[in-house]
Every structure is written in structure tokens, then in C-alpha cells.
Image (cartoon, rainbow, N blue to C red):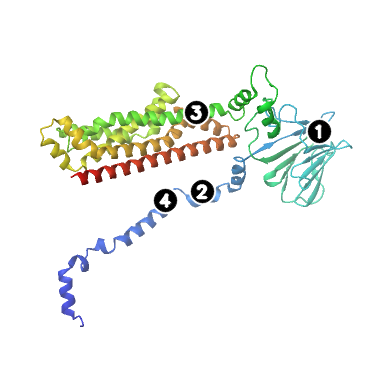
Amino acid sequence: MAITADDILSIEARYPHVFRRPLYQRFGPLFLVAGTVLYLAYALWFFSMPQVLRESHWERLPLFLAQWISYDLQPEFRLDQPEITPKYPRFSALGENPNPDWVIRNPDGTFTVLIDGPAKSVTFDKTKAVIVANGQTVPVSLTGGKPVISGPVPDWITAHDDEIVARMGFVGEVRVTVDRVKVRKRFLGWANFVFDTRSPFFGKPAGEVASLLVSGPELKPGTSNIALAADNIWNNAQWQHGDVWTKLLQTIVMAFLGTLLGGIVAFPLAFFAARNITPSGLLSQVLERFFDFMRSVDMLIWALFFTRAFGPGPLAGSAAIFFTEIGTLGKTYSEALENIDDKPREGVQSTGANGLLVQRYGVLPEVLPVFISQTLYQWESNTRGATIIGAVGAGGIGLKLWEAMRTNSNWANVFYMVLLTLAVVFVFDNISNFLRRRLSRTLHDYNRLQAERG
């Protein structure tokens, strides 16, 4: 049966909300997309993003990332001394008497440093240096008062007036002047992560260390080798495991203590702030504005304030989390109370119970799972937040992380602490999720049992 024009008009008249929608409903999605595009374009212009991206030093990114997962050794050879001898930095990863197999003293008096085997190396004496890399051999004369390259200069070498710099990629670089040769050789991994150069276990193969721990003679009289090894690891001067793990524990305690105290204070205040429970509308408004104030001041600002009041340390961090959580948990608790089903409360009231018993048996069983779930989530979140506020002096791993970053030369230690923080956040995230799932199942079983009894 064909639909006539009158039928169409009749349908439109019966369903005006479908066929005669307001302009904002018909074109709302289009306006939303257009507004988003315009806002992004404005943000790109406001922050000068094209210029920032164009002027960024992207070539530094690979080296920066390499410093997280590697370390370098920097022997220096003075050519203006009677005898050429390698000199290493004071805190070299090789220990007090380094003798690496990649630094070779040749029979003719020259030195060869193997940066990446023979394919990338430098051989030198007081008069000349020969740099080998990328299948090319580049001789450098050192007798004319400044280093001079004989022949064309490859693109991986930069020739300054008084210095030749040969960059060999990830494995390192060579710097040559008339009075010295400095080599930077990079290795994958973390040097001396277990034992530092002061330890009697330093430099020993893993099998020999295991043998000493199990049945070897005491390396320190009166102390077992196992206890000595544990002490050496904990007090590793280069990686500072003991201090790092202590600061990490401080971060965990800060998050737990601040969240716990915030929840304890917010719990009773939320009942007075909930409009459907408190007998005073003025009190409810005052507490709601109080919660807004406490959570509107960021945790980082609270941390800055308390570090001035108490000095740097975990007390300031715990106080910052505590104050923030009063506002956050107080707001979420009161909103949960305002959304309860009034029937259980009315049922308890009908028995003549006093106000405290009404809240205990008519309100609390309904909102307690929500309270616990919200508190667990905030605890998990504050574990991450405690790391951030530590950077401004509030103690914990964040302060240690900031100290390592400020040196701009210890990025492997930074990466180590970042990995520890990620591991802790991952563990607490899973613990929080597990507890929330168990709580949800327990509540579901309880409600089903109550329904069956009813």
C-alpha cells in the first residue's frame, strides 16, 4: 500500500520530536566536530606548535634514550706527557686499577682503542692518529700545532680549529687534539648494579660469586659471605639501593597514611554534608564548600605549603595527601549518600530507632561498599601522586628521582627508579582491582541472599 502525502503529514504531526527537531539537535554533532577542530587549530597557534616542533633537537633523542639503558667509559690519553698512559675518571665503573682489554698498548709504542672492535677504532701516538669507522680510515696529523686531517673529511667527523670529533653512533666517539685523545665507549646494560667497585665481590664472575656465598672462605673475618654480599648490595655507592628502596617505602607509606586519615575525617563529615541526611541545610552548604576548597587546591600546592611548614620529608607529603583526600573523599562520600535508596532507612525509622541506629542499619550497608571502592581507588591514585609531590621536597622516591635528574648525567639511575615506581603502581593497581572485585561479588551475594530471605 503506497503512502500518500497526507499520510506523511499525519505521521509528522504525530511525531514532531522526530521530524521537527530543533536546529541544535539536528546539527549538534556537526557543530561539536567543527568546534573541536577549531579549538585544536587555535591551540596549535597559541602554543606555537609548528615552530616548537621545527626547532626541537630531535637528534638528541636517541642519545638521551641510550643513556637510560647503557653506560659509557671515558679513558683520556695525554700526549704532552713523557709517557702516554690512559687516565680514567675518578669514579670509573672499572674500579681503581682499570686494565680493559679494549685498550691496547702496541709494541711500537702506539695505543689502539677498540670502540666497536677493529671496525671502529683509533690508533695514535704523539705525532699522528688514525681513526677507523664506517669502512673508512682517516689519518690525523698532530705535528702542526693543531690536528689536521689528510684528505677529505667524512660526514661522521667534525673538524674544528683545535679538535677533531669522530662520532661513531651508539658505540661512542673520539675527540683528538694535539695534546690529548679522549674516547667515549658505550656499553649496553647497567654497570656495577649489584656490587660496586669497593666490594670484594666486584669483577668476579657469577659462578665464582655463587661459590663464595655457598662454601667459600670468609672475605671479611667475623661476617658470613652472604651477609657481606647483602650489605654490599644494600650500600652500593653507585646505585644506592638501600636509600632508593627506603624512599620507595616512604612513598607507599605516605600514600597509605594520607588516604587513610583523609577517609577517616571525610567519613563523618560526609553524613553532615549530604542534603538528604543532615538536618541543617546551612551546615550542608558549609561542608560542601569546604570540600570544594580542600580538593580545588592541588596536592602539589599543599605539598609546597607543608614543606615550608614542616621542612622537606615524608610528613609534608602525608599531610598534603591527607588534606587533598578530605576534599575528594568527602565530596564522593556525600554524593554517594545523596543517591541512596530511602526505603531501607525509612524501614529502620519505622521501628522507632534513633538517628544513629538509622544511619548504621538503614544507610551504611548500602553505601559502605561504595565508600571502600572509592577509597581504594584514591589509594591507588595517591601512590602515583606521592611520587610527584616528592619532587618538591615532600620526601619519598620522588625527591630521590628529582635529585638524580638534576645532575643531567645519571639517567640510568633515573630509569631504575622509574621502573621501580611503575612496578609499585602496577602492583597496587592490581591489589586495588582485586579488592574491588571481591567487594563487588560479596555485595552481590549479600543482596541475593537478602532477596531470597525476603
Are discs 4 and 3 less than 8 Å apart at CB?
no
Q: Name the residue under label 3.
A: 247
Q: In the rendered image, which quarter is residue 34 located in?
A: bottom left
Q: Which of 71 and 380 is in front in this view?
A: 380
Q: Nearer the viewer, mark 1 or mark 3?
A: 3
Q: In this view, does 233 lie to the left or right of 331?
A: right
Query: Which quadrant would the N terminus be assigned to in this image?
Result: bottom left
Of the residues under marks 1 and 2, which one precedes in the sequence? 2
Of the residues under marks 2 and 4, which one precedes in the sequence? 4
The amino acid on which the numbered mark 2 sits, given as a three-letter code, is: Val
Q: Residue 43 carries which label?
A: 4
Q: Residues within 10 Å of mark 3 (few under 14, many from 20)?
A: many
Across and down, in percent, residue 397 comes to: 49, 31
Mark-to-mark CA distance, 1 and 3: 46 Å
Are discs 4 and 1 less than 8 Å apart at CB?
no
The amino acid on which the numbered mark 1 sits, given as a three-letter code, is: Leu
Mark-to-mark CA distance, 1 and 2: 43 Å
Mark-to-mark CA distance, 4 and 1: 56 Å
In percent of the image, x 45 and y 34: which residue is there?
Answer: 388
Q: Residue 79 carries which label?
A: 1
Q: Which mark is residue 52?
A: 2
Q: What element carries label 4?
A: helix
Across and down, in percent, residue 40 comes to: 41, 54
In the image, is residue 138 above or below residue 22? above
Q: Is mark 1 on a helix, strand or loop?
A: loop
